[in-house]
Image (cartoon, helix red, strand yellow):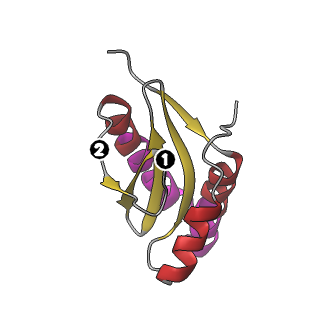
Amino acid sequence: MAVRELQWTKQAESQLVSLLDFYDQRNGSSTYSEKILARIYKLLGFAQNNPYYGQSLPQVENMNARFVVVEKIQVNFAVDDNAVRVFALFDARRDPEITEKILLSANTTKPVA
């Protein structure tokens, strides 16, 4: 089986940039952000080869939605036969009600080109 393409929705891409910018400013360097980004891509690489990688997201229906946690960042993605689509990233320590709203409002079908 071919490796699934990695795709990001505009929302997820924006959330990633915001999180990395936050850590850059807080730490005064990009070292920690680069470490997080490398770990995110490594774990998503596992998902590209294994559609059951990560924990399932029962809040998101009609798709194989899953998540992994990198440091304190929850990376949410959907897997199908052709792609892994990242649709939301956020601080995993958030209020569960806010988390569920983010997941339910995430547009999982429109990746960035």
Residue at image mark 2: 53
Task: Identify the element where label 1 is drawn.
Answer: loop
Residue in the picture at 68% in, 53% down: 11
Do we see residue 28 in this rendering? no
Looking at the rendered image, the quarter that the N terminus falls into is top left
Camera-side residue: 39 or 101? 101
Residue 56 found in image quarter: bottom left
Q: Please indicate whether residue 9 sits to the left or right of residue 99 in the image.
A: right
Q: Please indicate whether residue 62 sits to the left or right of residue 20 in the image.
A: left
Q: Position of residue 18 (x, y in %)?
A: 66, 62
Q: Position of residue 62 (x, y in %)?
A: 49, 47
Rendered position, 52 above or below 57: above
* Residue type at the position of mark 1: Asn
How many labels, in total?
Answer: 2
Camera-side residue: 90 or 108? 108
Query: In the orientation shown, which residue stands out farthest toward the front?
Result: 62
Q: Which portion, as a residue range, is magenta? A: 19-42
Q: Please indicate whether residue 13 sits to the left or right of residue 50 in the image.
A: right
Find out whether residue 31 is within the magenta segment.
yes
Dominant secondary-structure state across the stretch colored magenta:
helix
Q: Position of residue 60 (x, y in %)?
A: 49, 57
Residue 101 found in image quarter: bottom right
Residue at image mark 1: 62
For the residues marked 2 and 1, what is the alpha-carbon distance in whole angstroms?
Answer: 18 Å
